[in-house]
Image (tube, rainbow, N blue to C red):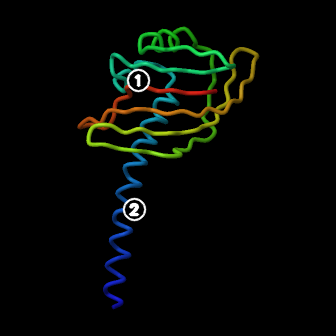
Amino acid sequence: MNWFYGVIVSTMFYFSSVVLTHADEVRDFLLKQLNATEFNTISDTFVDGYQSFVISDEQYLFVTKDAYRQLMASVKDVERKVNSFQITSRSETADFVTVNFNYNYSAKVGNANINADVEGVSVLLKTGDGYISIFDAQRE
């Protein structure tokens, strides 16, 4: 009987480690995007038709991949740090991953200090090398 429980526990740890590995890959992927300081280092992590929907101060805007590239190129004197990041839920099909997340960041733009909490959802396409962002929606 102890052998049976050992097999069950080992199997549970195996499947838990597989799930955690995938979760860590997604987490690392999203943090790579959030921590990037130059768009060319993450350009290949966004599909060409990428869209982002952002709500901030009860106003919203859509941001495309090209607009994101231009925004990052125009803002050079920003110090930004992700203080915390958590994936709150995740769903997966053969081709896609959806991730709900929240994070806190601090930034310094000129003389202004910013500290904000963000919650959002990402839709990712699975590739042979990892993931590509298709769509993000966030509220700051």
For mark 1, does the 10 Å Cα neighbourhood hold few (<14), some (14 to 19), or many (20 or more) residues? Answer: few
Q: Position of residue 24 (x, y in %)?
A: 43, 48
Q: Which residue is mark 1?
A: 41
Q: Which residue is mark 2?
A: 16
Q: Nearer the viewer, residue 82 or 135?
A: 135
Q: Secondary structure at mark 1?
A: helix
Tell me which corner region of the image, top left, top right, bottom left or bottom right, holds residue 59: top right
For mark 2, does the 10 Å Cα neighbourhood hold few (<14), some (14 to 19), or many (20 or more) residues? Answer: few
Q: Residue at x 44, y 45 (%)?
A: 90
Q: Position of residue 103 (x, y in %)?
A: 60, 37
Q: Position of residue 97 (x, y in %)?
A: 37, 39
Q: Residue at x 51, y 26 (%)?
A: 137
Upstream in sequence: badge 2 or badge 1: 2
Residue 135 as seen in the image, left or right of residue 77: left
Please, is residue 90 above or below residue 133 in the view?
Answer: below
Q: Residue at x 52, y 30 (%)?
A: 35
User: Which image quadrant: the C terminus?
Assistant: top right
User: Which image quadrant: the N terminus?
Assistant: bottom left
Q: Position of residue 129 (x, y in %)?
A: 27, 37
Tell me which corner region of the image, top left, top right, bottom left or bottom right, holds residue 60: top right
Please, is residue 84 above or below residue 42 in the view?
Answer: below
Please, is residue 65 above or below residue 9 in the view?
Answer: above
